[in-house]
Amino acid sequence: MTYSPEDIHHRLNSQNPSDRRVAAVMIGKARHYEFLDELADLLQHDTHADVRSMGAFALDLLGRADTIPILIEALYDQSFDVRSNAGWALVNMAKRIMPQLIVPEVIQVLDDDENPHAQDMAYMVLSRIPDETARIALNRYREK
């Protein structure tokens, strides 16, 4: 598998979802930060859940704090795989960077009674971040 920017660009623009999925993985594995906007676009707008899922996975590999809002939004995705990869990306970033950048945003998702699937993923994320604010939010949620 090649990781050249030209190959990635070609795959990103392909009509074939498998090509776009591979491009996302290439971007993450090769740390091609110059494709961050395109990767975010895949996660937010691609019509195929497996492409969006790999977009979240690749953002996890890149580990950039500026992608946190996009990953939070992905917790609301219809696809469990997308929510799961976004959730794990948030957990990993909280551990690598700083929990306080992520925990308040995830607590807002946990408190959103309109979307139980997003709540479930927010619960998973918070339960895996060693942070007192996260623990308090989880206890409050369980007492509901």
Image: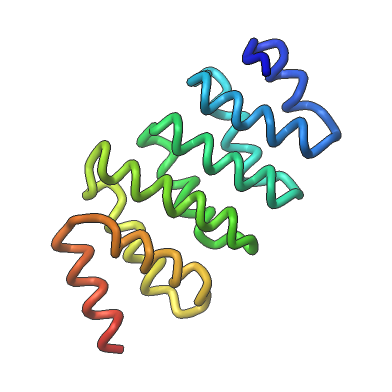
Q: Position of residue 110 (x, y in %)?
A: 38, 70
- The vertical placement of 50 against 121, above or below, is above
Looking at the image, which residue is at 62% across and 31% down? 24
- Image quadrant containing the C terminus: bottom left
Q: For the point 70% across and 11% down, which residue is it?
A: 6
Q: Tell me if 94 is positioned left or right of 53 in this view.
A: left
Which residue is farthest bottom? 144
In the image, taking residue 47 as reference, residue 36 lies left or right, namely left
Scheme of colours in the image: rainbow
Q: Nearer the viewer, residue 47 or 26?
A: 26
Residue extending furthest toward the right: 15
Residue 59 higher or lower than 80, as above or below = above
Q: Position of residue 140 (x, y in %)?
A: 23, 80
Residue at horizontal 76 percent and vertical 49 percent from the top: 47
Residue closest to the far front: 1
Quarter of the rendering containing residue 14? top right
Position in image of residue 92 (x %, y %): 34, 44
Residue 122 x, y percent position in the rendering: 40, 64
Using the image, determine if residue 73 lies above or below residue 127.
above
Numbered-mark total: 0
Say whether residue 101 is left or right of residue 90: left
Q: Is residue 142 above or below residue 110?
A: below
Image quarter for residue 7? top right
Q: Residue drawn 59% across and 33% down?
A: 39
Q: If the image is split into quadrants, where does the N terminus sit?
A: top right
